[in-house]
Amino acid sequence: MNELVRYERRGQLGLVTIDSPPVNALSGRVCDGLGKAFETGARDDSVRGLVLACAGRTFIAGADINELGGDLDFREVFALMEGMDKPVVAAIHGTALGGGAEAALACHYRVAAADARLGFPEISLGIVPGAGGTQRLPRLIGARQALELLLSGRFVDAGEALKLGLVDAVADGDPLEFALEYTNGLIEEGKGPRPVGEMSLHRDEATGEFLRAERARLAGAADGRVVPLMDVDAIEAALDLPFAEGLVREREISDASLETVESRAMRRLFFAERQTSRIPGIDPGLASEIGSAAIIGAGTMGRGIAMAFANSGIPVTLQDVDRPTVDKSLAAIRAEYDKRVQRGRMTAEAAAARIALIQGSAEFSDIAEADLVIEAVFESMAIKKEIFERMDAYCKPGAILASNTSTLDIEEIASATRRPSDVVGLHFFSPAHVMRLLEVVRSAQTSDAVLATAMKLAGRLRKIGVLSANAYGFIGNRMMDPYGREAEHMLLEGATPQQIDSALERFGMAMGLLAVFDMAGVDVGVRVREAHADKLPDDPGFYRASALLVENGMLGQKSGAGYYRYEQGSRERHENPAALELFEREARRLGIERREIGDDEIVSRCICALINEGARVLEEGVALRAADIDVVYTAGYGFPRHRGGPMFHCDTLGVARVVEKLQEFSETLDARYWQPSALLLRLAEEGGSLADAEAP
Ligand code: COA
């Protein structure tokens, strides 16, 4: 029908196959081809039924996100499919997502491969489905279940889809052959078209109550998201309006969702996350495969990294100085997998297979054969250099030597070896088997092949690799510095930890910064600052609150108190009067005026500091692109995805307004911290976008 959609006869059936790699996304061309294919099938009287299938790795994985917001419209072709006077069956394999699931709903019957999955991930792109999904889905599986799927965006497997009534049969064997047979069976049984749009749906009291409660819950979430509520609007339309009118209403809602900041932010992140691995000037073809890895240091970090490798099927040796340390670490890993098995997240066999991939060792020589060795020991330059010297002596030629340092100079670490071009920073985030961010740190000597391999490895570990230059704090922690500086200083000025964290959480941060410090250990940051004392400003109030806590033995959750107080075995935050008293006394000593600080000021100071430092990170070339910085903050630091990351959020606020705010702070607060970066000043003057900016 065109180069992306084929039509062929299979006996009495017409088979429509989409072949648009990589994921058969619904583009304008695909819609065109689909329309023509179904028209052909409709015209041919000898065709008694139609099957819609896809070539390649998956059934349609969604609308082509590149074309959303433009002329792309597949409502008409779905109406054509649903209106056919012979049965239309979707043969689903891989992932039928978003527009792909909507296409399946426009068919009269659905059969799925046993390992297929279906879902409506539009919520994670800030979109309300707009091609009949919100009107057909509740007709098929009920309003409650439909709303749950739309709001969670979760994928359901074939078994659950069958139970829900989302699919009619699960294929045993090849899904296409099964679908063809299934359709022939329908014809034999005299079963004709069964348009989902004609199925009845009524509002009853319980459903009404459920929707009211959901609406109240979402409105109360106070993180500023609007699209979830628009999903409720769409489901209400399905309940209250005839199908045709519901489709019109859905279209209005879906179009409006595309215009939201939330949607623009999240669609940009979708592509930004897939772009970070592309490094200008470096051919991805240089990457080699990592067949085995070794981790030096079996602490929390090393353990998490080892699990990340095992989870991706890569054998890994976990090495530490003595056997008891190694055994303790292996036991903790087993316990972690056992927990997952108990919670039904993993089968016992899968857990055993992963555990079997992790070997413990107390011998340094056991790292010799690994393709990649990652050092994950205590954050001390002297210790790391000593370890790298030994790695150099033991590792096979061509092995990649990586450090998991979060603050130290990779080039200096590499200088301990005779092969600095094989040395790279791989900064994992804790817990390393869960967190998706991986900062890949390049020194001036790191070879292109090593960088290409590191990026490929990130993908294999199902992480997002973001390139950073070798500069203090890399991208993420460097930006954290001024962000935390403001939060800490406001404690001396009179804000409580609760106030600061709640304001940040209402803004949408996954967790308030002070609660994060408590979780990580307040002493961790204090130690890092001590190690870099020569670079710190001459300011007695600089990160003074955390230093005070540590001086008084309040190290955070692990010691039962930090910015907050914790009951034994619980992570619930309680006010810590002892800490508040320390802050107040210190403020008096330093002559800092105490006052009421509002939520707006808290968010504005923290986020403007973050934005300004991000702009510096970019203009100094530490990050390649503003989008990379946004990926770091959303994937690794809990910045709300619906605000797109700090750089995108700057554009939302308006670059000129952010500069004004920085200038205002430089007059009312400590001027040395608030000089707007040159990049922001230039963009404000030119009316440019920070989100689109790249390193010079
Ligand atoms: N529109 C445009 N491009 C898409 C796409 C879509 N809906 N879905 C995937 N792609 C592209 C990706 O950008 C990537 O391109 P690249 O190789 O040039 O970077 C390529 O397809 C492969 O996708 P990737 O995510 O790397 O593959 P994966 O195997 O890890 O995951 C999916 C496959 C389908 C699960 C995943 O791509 C996905 O979730 N896609 C979006 C689905 C969605 O949200 N649909 C709703 C839209 S209405």
Image (cartoon, rainbow, N blue to C red):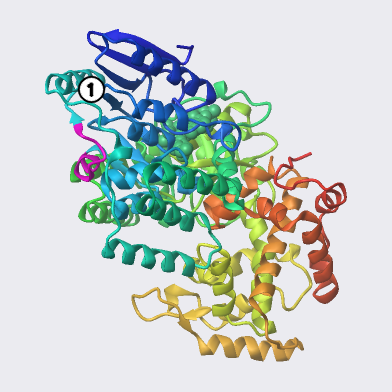
Q: Position of residue 47 (x, y in %)?
A: 27, 12
Q: Can residue 1 be seen at all in this image of the molecule?
A: yes
What segment carries the magenta color?
159-169
User: Which quadrant holds the C terminus?
Assistant: top right
Q: Which of 527 and 566 is in front in this view?
A: 566
Say left or right for 160 vs 146. left
Judging from the image, what secondary structure is the residue with disc 1 in? helix
Residue position marked by numbered label 1 in the rendering: 179
Which quadrant would residue 172 be assigned to in this image?
Answer: top left
Please tell me whether residue 665 is drawn above or below residue 75 in the rendered image. below
Q: Does the magenta stretch include residue 163?
A: yes
Q: Which of 592 and 197 is in front in this view?
A: 197
Total marks in image:
1
Please tell me whether residue 411 is drawn above or below residue 49 in the rendered image. below
Q: Is residue 194 magenta?
A: no
Q: Which amino acid does label 1 sit on?
A: Ala
Please tell me whether residue 434 is drawn above or below residue 603 in the rendered image. above
Say left or right for 198 vs 477. left
Q: Position of residue 236 (x, y in %)?
A: 39, 55
Residue at coordinates 46% horizontally, 17% vertically from top-left? 33
User: Which quadrant holds the N terminus?
Assistant: top left
Q: Residue furthest right?
A: 685
Q: Which residue lies furthest to the left in this view?
A: 189
Q: Where is residue 437 in the image (x, y as percent from the top left)?
A: 52, 47
Say left or right for 82 vs 432. left
- Binning the other alpha carbons within 10 Å of mark 1 as few (below 14), some (14 to 19) or many (20 upward) gives many
Q: Position of residue 694 (x, y in %)?
A: 73, 40
Which quadrant would residue 183 be assigned to in this image?
Answer: top left
Which quadrant would residue 195 be assigned to in this image?
Answer: top left
Say left or right for 58 vs 687. left
